[in-house]
Image (cartoon, grey):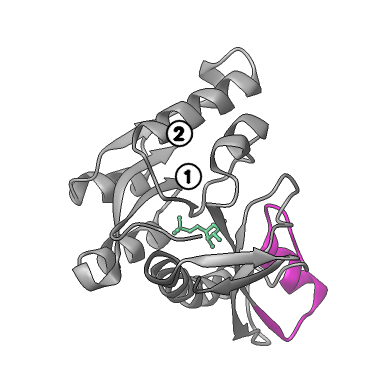
Amino acid sequence: MPIPTPARLVVLVSGSGTNLQALLDATADPAYGARVVAVGADREDIEGLRRAERAGVPTFVRRVGHFTTREHWDQALADTVAAFEPDLVVSAGFMKLVGEPFLARFGGRFVNTHPALLPAFPGTNGAGDALEYGVKVAGATLFVVDSGVDTGPILAQTVVPVEDDDTVETLHERIKVAERQMLVDAVGRMAREGFTITDRKVRFGQ
Ligand code: GRF
C-alpha cells in the first residue's frame, strides 16, 4: 500500500500515552515521513491527551457510555477519525476493540501494538499472562487489526528477557521500552516505504 509523505497519523490512546509520545518525538524530524494529525481517546483526563495538547495536536474523546449502542459509538469514532483524513490509524494503548463500521473504513491501515509475542497471550493482560505462564522471553507485537482479538497480520515484533524477580509492572515497563522503539521504527517504515500483505505476510516496500 503506497502512502503519501508525510503520512497523516491518527493515534488512539486510553492511558499514559508513552507510545504516543515516542511517535510525537519521532515525527518532529521531517525525515521520519509522518506526522500526528490528531489523537483520540475513549476517556477524558488521561496523560495521553495531555501529551497531545502539549504538542499542539488536536484531540477528541468518544466515550462508549455516551452512545446508545456500541455500534453507534463505533460509527461515531470512525466518522471523527475520518474527518482527519488519516493514512494510518495507530492504536497505542487504546483499550477498546473496534467493530465492523470502523474496520470497514480503516481496515488494512489500522494498526495496534500489544505487549506480548502474539499469537501467545492475546487480550488485555498480555504481559501479566506471559509472566504467569513462566516464559523466559516476552515482548511486543505490532499488527494490522482485523476482526479478531489480536489476530491480525504481524508488522513487527520485539523481544525482551523475563527476569526471575520480575513483577508484572517491571516486566511491562521493560516491554514498553522495546515496544516504543518497535512502534516508531515500523510506523516510519510504513510511512516511507509503504507495505503489502499477502497470505498474512507483511512486507515493507511496494
Ligand atoms: C502498551 O504496552 C500497549 O501495548 C498496551 O498498553 C500499553 C500502553 O502504554 N496495550 P502507553 O499508554 O503507550 O504508555
User: Is residue 77 located in the magenta-colored stretch of the structure?
Assistant: no
Mark 1 sits near ligand 1, with its Cβ under 8 Å away: yes
Q: Specify whether residue 129 is painted magenta.
A: yes
- Identify the element where label 1 is drawn: loop
Q: What mark, if any, has residue 139 been given in the picture?
A: none
The image position of residue 191, as x and y in percent, is 39, 64
In front here: 15 or 118? Answer: 118
- The residue lying at 36 percent from left, 36 percent from top is 45
Q: Which residues are the magenta region? A: 121-138
The front one of 51 and 84 is 84
* Residue 176 drawn at (x, y percent): 50, 70
Is residue 115 visible to us here?
no
Residue 158 to residue 104: above or below: below
Q: Nearer the viewer, residue 166 or 24?
A: 24
Q: Which residue is mark 2?
A: 43
Q: Is residue 152 left or right of residue 36?
A: right
Residue 164: horizontal and vertical position, in percent? 68, 87
Q: Secondary structure at mark 2?
A: loop
Indicate left or right for 90 with 70 as reference: left
Q: Earlier in the sequence, mark 1 or mark 2?
A: 1
Question: Seen from this angle, which residue lies furthest top?
Answer: 68
Question: Which mark, by number, is residue 14?
Answer: 1
What amino acid is at disc 2? Arg
Q: In this rendered view, identify the residue nearer to me: 201 or 139.
A: 201
- Indicate the quadrant where residue 185 lies: bottom left
